[in-house]
Image (tube, rainbow, N blue to C red):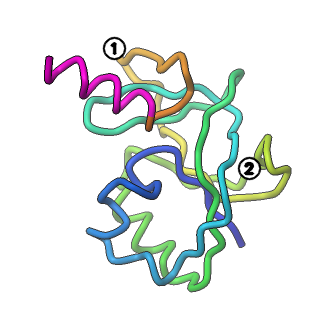
Amino acid sequence: MKIAFYGTLMRGFRAQGLLQVEAALRYEGVCRISGVLWDLGPYPGLTEGGGAVRGEVFAILDEGVLEKLDEFEGDEYVRRQVTLLEPQTEAWVYVLAQAPAGAKPIESGCWRTHALTRGARRSS
C-alpha cells in the first residue's frame, strides 16, 4: 500500500516529524498526481481535475499510520485511492472535501517551489 503527499507531509517539512510517523513510512520517490493545487495559506489543498501536482510517494509500512494521518487532515480532506500519473501506481491521496472558496491555484503544481518563492517574497 502506498500514499502520496503534496504539501507539508513531504520530506523537508515538519508535519511528519510532529506527527511522529516517519517510522511507519518509507520514501519511494517523487510522483505526479492528477489535479489542481491550491494555496490555503500555511498549507496546500488538492482538488481532482486537470493538471498535474508534484508530490512524493511513500510505502506504508504500518497501516495504523492512516488513522493518525486521517486525524491530522481532519474534515477538510478526504482520503481517496487514486492512480498516480507518475509512477503509474495506486496510492492514497488526501483531496479537499470541498472546493476552496477564495483560494488561488498554484500554477506550478509544486508546493515546495511555491512555499520557497512565497517565503522569499515575504523576507525581502
Q: Is residue 114 rendered magenta in the image?
A: yes
Residue 118 placement (x, y as % from top left): 29, 23
Q: Earlier in the sequence, mark 1 or mark 2?
A: 2
Three-letter code for the amino acid on which mark 2 is drawn: Val
Q: CA distance from mark 1 to mark 2?
A: 26 Å
Residue 33 placement (x, y as % from top left): 68, 40
Q: Foreground: 76 or 64?
A: 64
SS at mark 2 in the image: strand
Task: Pick the quarter of the image with the C terminus.
Answer: top left
Three-letter code for the amino acid on which mark 1 is drawn: Gly
**Residue 1's image quarter?**
bottom right
Residue 119 placement (x, y as % from top left): 24, 28
Q: Which residue is mark 1?
A: 102
> Which residue ends up furthest to the front in the rendered image?
124
Q: Residue at x 45, y 58 (%)?
A: 11
> Which residue ends up furthest to the right in the rendered image?
88
The residues colored magenta run 113-124
Say few, some or many: other residues with alpha carbon within 10 Å of mark 1 (under 14 / 14 to 19 / 20 or more). few
Q: Which mark is residue 16?
A: none
**Residue 53's image quarter?**
top right
Q: Is residue 63 left or right of residue 1?
A: left
Q: Is residue 113 left or right of residue 82?
A: left
Q: Residue at x 48, y 77 (%)?
A: 65
**Residue 108's image quarter?**
top right
Relative to 95, residue 103 above or below: above
Q: Foreground: 98 or 87?
A: 87
Q: Which residue is mark 2?
A: 82
Residue 76 placement (x, y as % from top left): 38, 44
Relative to 48, residue 101 above or below: above
